[in-house]
Image (spheres, helix red, strand yellow):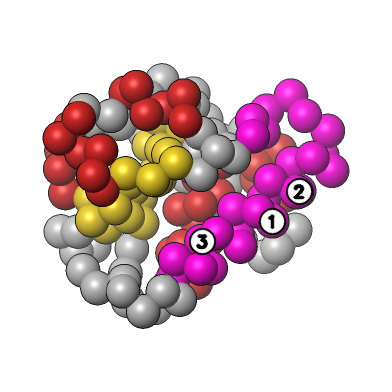
Amino acid sequence: MRNKFILFICKGNSGRSQMAEAFFNHLSKKEKAISAGTAPDKKIHPQTTQIMSEVGIDVSQQKPKLLTESMMKKAYKIIVMDSDILKDIPPKYLQKTESWRIGKLLGKPIEHARKIRNSIKRKVYRIVNAPHLQF
């Protein structure tokens, strides 16, 4: 992985940010993404594994990671899954931070989880295909 990457953040790093990382790394031929959580869960949520496998992406071996200062410093762009996470981003990194306002995944019906997955995929696709994505 290059020194610079896109960083996707949510609270537990067991759902939304893991999906964003997986979609980005699946779609991008040149650049990489990582994901992290402000309070990571112990493992990827089974529903995340299920709905990603439905679109041909295996996240079963992914592990939730704790967000670190080093990750934020090295990231080319930081994307938080909802605005609640913005409070955990130090002010010096806010200029390269974007909030997607993606709803919570866990505890929702599978149909809702699929809608979230599809929304994340569309947003990631737009980033991967943006002409300004130069690291």
The residue furthest front is 95
The magenta span reads 103-128
Q: Position of residue 118 (x, y in %)?
A: 69, 56
Which residue is painted at 19% across and 59% down in the image?
4
Which residue is painted at 20% across and 39% down in the image?
93
Q: Which residue is mark 2?
A: 114
Q: CA gap, disc 3 to disc 1? A: 10 Å
Secondary structure mostly taken by the magenta-highlighted segment of the chain: helix
Q: Quadrant of the N terminus?
A: bottom left
Left-right relation of 21 to 87: right
Residue 6 in view, yes or no: yes
Left-right relation of 90 to 37: left
Which residue is painted at 45% across and 76% down in the image?
129
Q: Position of residue 16 (x, y in %)?
A: 56, 41
Q: Which residue is mark 1?
A: 118
Amino acid at the residue labelled 3 = Val
Asked if disc 1 and disc 2 are in contact, CB closer than 8 Å, the reply is yes
Q: Badge 2: how crowded within 10 Å, few (<14), some, or many (20+)?
A: some
Image quarter of residue 94: top left
Q: Quadrant of the C terminus?
A: bottom left
Q: Is residue 50 depicted above or below 47 in this figure?
A: below
Q: Secondary structure at mark 3?
A: helix
Left-right relation of 35 to 54: left
